[in-house]
Structure formats: C-alpha cells, structure tokens
Image (cartoon, helix red, strand yellow):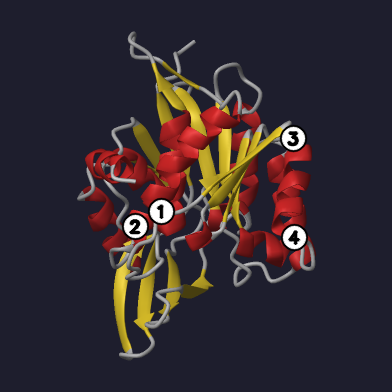
Amino acid sequence: MTAARRIVVVGESLVDLVWHTAAGTVRPSPGGSPANVAIGVHRLGRPVTLVTCWGDDPPGALVATYLAGTGLDVLRAPATTGGTTVALAYVDEETGSATYDFLASWAPDHIPVGEDTALLHTGSLAVVVSPGAEQVLEACRRLHGREGRAVAVDLNVRPAVQPDRAAYRSAVERLARVADVVKASDEDLRWLWPGQDPAASARDLLAGGPRLVVLTRGADGATGFLPGAEVSVAAPRVSVADTIGAGDAFQSALLAGLFAAHSDGTATVRMPADALELERVLRDCVVAGALATTRTGAQPPTAEELRTAAAAR
C-alpha cells in the first residue's frame, strides 16, 4: 500500500467575472474556492494536488493558463460535459464584500484520489452541483475512517446553485457524516438553519460525526468546536480591499496546520487534542484570512508572509 504523503483538494475551477458595482467595471479572474484553497496550501509549502475539471471553451482556456502558472500540481479529471463554470461576483466598494451568481458546470466522470492522500479537502459548488457532487461524496466515503487520514470540508454555501434550503441541508448532513473536519461561516449556517444561532448549528454538525467543526465570523474571528472543548480566536484588524478568497486562505492554513509531515517523507493528519492546540492552529488561520482581505482578488499568503504577520500579532 502506498504511504500517505500529500493533501488532495477536489472541486471546481472557474472564472469569476468580478463586477465592481461603483465603478461599473467587470474583469475576468480565474479561480474557484477549491482551486484557491489548493494554491494557498501550495504557497504554505505543503505537498498538494488539485483534482478539478474545466471545459474546452474560452473560460476553460483562461483557467488552464492560470493554473499552469501557479506551480500547482493539477490533475484534470475527465468530465461528461464540455463547459466551465462562470461566476458573477458583485463587489461592494464600501465594504469590500462580494455576492455571487453562477453558471455552474461540475460533471467529473470520476474522482481519482490516490493512496498517497493523507488529507482530502472539498467543498463549495463541488458538493451540491450534480452530477459531480455524488462523485465527491463517494471519494470522501472511500477515505473517511482510515487511520492517519482525514476528510475536510468547507461548506462555502452558495444558494444561487441550490436555492432549495432543505435539499442543501440534506447534502450538508450527508457530507458531514463522512467528514472529519467541517468549516462553515456564520452566514453559511444562518442560511442553512435560519433562526438558529450559528454556534448551535456548529455544535449540531459536530454531533453528526466530524471530529472538528470550525465556525468563521469574518472580521470577528473564528471558533473551533471539539468534543468537550470550544475556543474562539479574534481576527487581526486590517484595511480591507475585498473579501474574495479570504475564507479560502483561512481554509488553506487550517489544512496546513493539520497536516503532519514526517522525516521519512510520509504524512498523517494530526487533529488538535485540546483547546490549546486548536487555538494555535486557528491563530494562523485568522491571520491568513485577514491577509487575503488586504489584496484585490484571491491572493492567499505565502508561508513567509504568514509567519511574519503571525509573529507581529
């Protein structure tokens, strides 16, 4: 059996049409949450492969060129359709926040996840857009529960691709049962379970099977939930350019913090044993997310940038 050695990120690559509402300008920007996460992990110096797909169309050509220039190891999965997902991101100039609409295409024929996978990450459109969502769920099932390995999910809820709240909740609950780590924002959980405090929803998710649930609150930081322990970490105050990719940068740091590389070249996933260990991981995560907001577009920090910023807190 091949030893586990790397992080594998599974999900869509797409083109964001970023619409700055005040200026009335629109610019194409390749990315997608899973692609952003994989690039962030790569910049943090961890071995990572992005398993994704794109079409043989103009947006797909833009994605292919972009990914080729990142230095990222990319595995283009065979797909049953020829389209590339396009997202329209509306950026509010006053707050830097972004809202989205999608023309989604996510139809990998299968998800190739090798035996060298220590940590599998997925989320966003890939877990709710059919037919690819079913392939992603099966890939998570295959890895879940294996010793030294883990599945991580960033819900990154996008009602524009699945407006049926009950159907979205069912997809999330199925995924949580085969995940070790689930991350969600307060906005994600408020939409999924309206009228309920997001912290209570996070605890409900934890009770469904994961070993760790992380709740992000934007500028207010994040809270981690372990069985029997909870810890909150404040986010550093920064000047925000826009929020695109901030959650993805946070998730990259979370994956990097859980990935334990060994001297023989193998790797395992090390879950925080207590609140103190979890706090150390989350401190890097909130710094990574904050750094991403100081830049236009999805630009996760490098390992050196993260070390410098974390040391300055």
The percent position of residue 262, horizontal first and vertical second, equals 38, 13
**As shown in the figure, which amino acid type bears the numbered disc 1?**
Gly
Question: Height in image: 94 above or below 306?
Answer: below
Residue at position x 40%, y 53% from top? 289
Task: Tell me the distance, in whole angstroms, between the alpha carbons under discs 2 and 3.
Answer: 31 Å
Q: Is residue 253 above or below residue 96?
A: above
Q: Residues within 10 Å of mark 3 (few under 14, many from 20)?
A: some
> Neighbour class for label 2 at 10 Å: few (<14), some, many (≥20)?
many
Between 305 and 141, the residue placed more toward the observer is 305
- Looking at the rendered image, the disc whose residue lies closer to the viewer, 4 or 3, is 4
Q: What residue is pinned by disc 1? A: 289
Specify which label sits upstream in the sequence, 2 or 4. 4
Whichever of callouts 2 and 3 sits on the residue coming sooner in the sequence is: 3
Residue 305 appears at what percent x and percent y?
24, 45
Name the one closer to the observer, 247 or 111: 247
Question: Which residue bears the numbered disc 4?
Answer: 197
Q: Is residue 219 above or below residue 203?
A: below
What residue is at 31 percent from the left and 68 percent from the top? 29
Give how far apart the Cα atoms at labels 1 and 3 are. Answer: 26 Å
Amino acid residing under circle 4: Asp
Type of amino acid at the residue the image marks with label 2: Ala
| Structural distance between the alpha carbons of marks 4 and 3 | 20 Å
Residue under numbered circle 3: 209
One can see residue 83 in this view: yes
- Find out whether the residues at labels 1 and 3 contact each other: C-beta distance under 8 Å: no
Q: Secondary structure at mark 3?
A: loop
Q: Nearer the viewer, residue 256 or 2?
A: 256
Q: Residue at x 55, y 29 (%)?
A: 276
Q: Which residue is mark 2?
A: 292
Amino acid at the residue labelled 3: Gly
Q: CA distance from mark 4 to mark 1?
A: 23 Å
